[in-house]
Amino acid sequence: MSIVTSQKVLARLRRWFPTREFFMRSDGRVRFVRVSTRTQIVAAGSVAALLLLVWIGVLGWALVAQLVAGSQRAQLAQREAAVAQAEAKVARYRNGIGGVAQELERRQDYLDKMIESHVGELPAAASATPEKVSLSNSAAGPDAARFARIEARQLALIDTLTKYADARTARAETAIRRVGLNPAMIAAADRKAMGGPLIRAGTAPSDPRFAAFGRSLERMTAMQNGLARIPNTLPASLEYISSGFGYRADPFDGSAAFHAGLDFRGPVGAPIFAAAAGSVSFTGVRQGYGNCVEISHGNGLMTRYAHMSRIGAKLGQKVDAGAVIGQIGSTGRSTGPHLHFEVRINDRPVNPRPFLEANRDVFQQDHTHRG
């Protein structure tokens, strides 16, 4: 604001609030009271500010009242909708008991098939399955209350199993990431390895919670299949690791050399086990390795077992984790009986130790070897 403008404003305020003088008589004495322009401006400003605050308060109260009224109307509308939905469900139960029974029966059939194919034995939290529904039971007469209980139990079971599947999936994904693999790629690879004749499983329920439940189970199964193909099982019942992964002094000439796996010392003839499920992709002799077996586990993962005294697997054979694939020996470039064990990703050697140590409690099968 310029000086000229300020002077004009000041002159106008002086005209509005000129200095005023008052004479007051009290107890026979005359007192002089002088009210300056500044004092009048301050008093007027205070009154204006107070009025503004009062106005804002009134507006705020009106706004709060409007919001409360809107919230109450929304709650009332929700209650009315819930009542209408409940009344519609009751009417549906009463007027179309056959259709309700068919829908509940279809839901139960879907539940049974999904649990059988993806879960197997139910977790303790979901052991109480809903009672069976059949049209023969409904023929005796309408039983809306019973059907309502069955539906509630089905939905509760769906919720419990969805959380169960999601929790198992999260644990499996954590284990997969800790060994440097991508869970998304494993899930994609699991979907690609599919086939067979088309056998319809029936019409899936229209309730979206059932579809979400199915997706959760499928992802859980994909992660579990991926875990089964990750080397996490000790390849033999051995005494100790005689040589680790990485650079070392070569046992023959002492020069610096890279060791691409782990050496486990053990007696000749001791069994060697597959470290994970897979398919035998090589059996025979490799230079430096002697008698050797290689197992492909998918997603670029391969394990190699070397220096065997006897090969006990066949090319193309499907093996589970813990399957006996050979015996310990000292063939090839070896200073004594032991198992040379490698883990390779896209034919690049990686340290097997994290695979053998990572989250063993996550894997569902017990691959402890005895004898």
Image: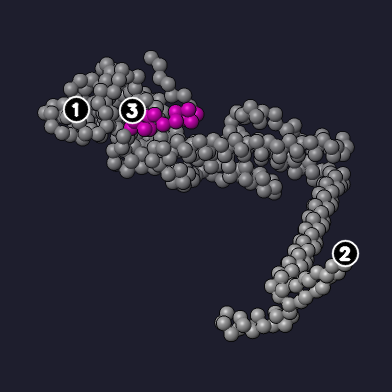
Residue sitting farthest toward the front: 28
Determine the residue positioned at 77% across, 75% down: 21
Query: Where is the N terminus found, in terms of image quarters?
Result: bottom right
Of badges 3 and 1, nearer the viewer stands: 1
Left-right relation of 255 to 311: left
**In the visual, does 177 lie left or right of 119?**
left
- The answer to whether 19 is drawn above or below residue 287 in the figure is below
Reading the chain from its start, which is encountered first: label 2 or label 3? Answer: 2
- Contact (CB < 8 A) between labels 2 and 3? no
Residue 204 appears anywhere in the view: no
Query: Going 87% across and 44% down the picture, which residue do you hit?
Result: 94
Magenta-colored stretch includes residue 264: no
Q: How was the colour assigned to the protein in this rendering?
A: one colour
Of circles 2 and 3, which is in front? Answer: 2
Q: Mark 3 falls on what kind of element?
A: loop
Residue drawn at x 41%, y 28% is: 321
Q: Is residue 359 magenta?
A: yes
User: Magenta segment, which residues?
Assistant: 352-364
Q: Earlier in the sequence, mark 3 or mark 1?
A: 3
Kindly identify which residue carries mark 3: 313
Assess disc 1: are there few (<14), some (14-19) or many (≥20) residues with their C-alpha within 10 Å of its C-alpha.
some
The image shows residue 19 at horizontal and vertical percentages of: 73, 77
Task: Please tell me in which quadrant of the rendered image residue 63 appears.
Answer: bottom right
Q: Please state, as top left, top right, bottom left or bottom right, where the C terminus lies in the image.
A: top left
Q: Which residue is mark 2?
A: 27
What secondary structure is marked by label 2?
Answer: loop
**Which residue is label 1 attached to?**
332
Q: Position of residue 364 (x, y in %)?
A: 50, 29
Q: CA distance from mark 2 to mark 3?
A: 126 Å
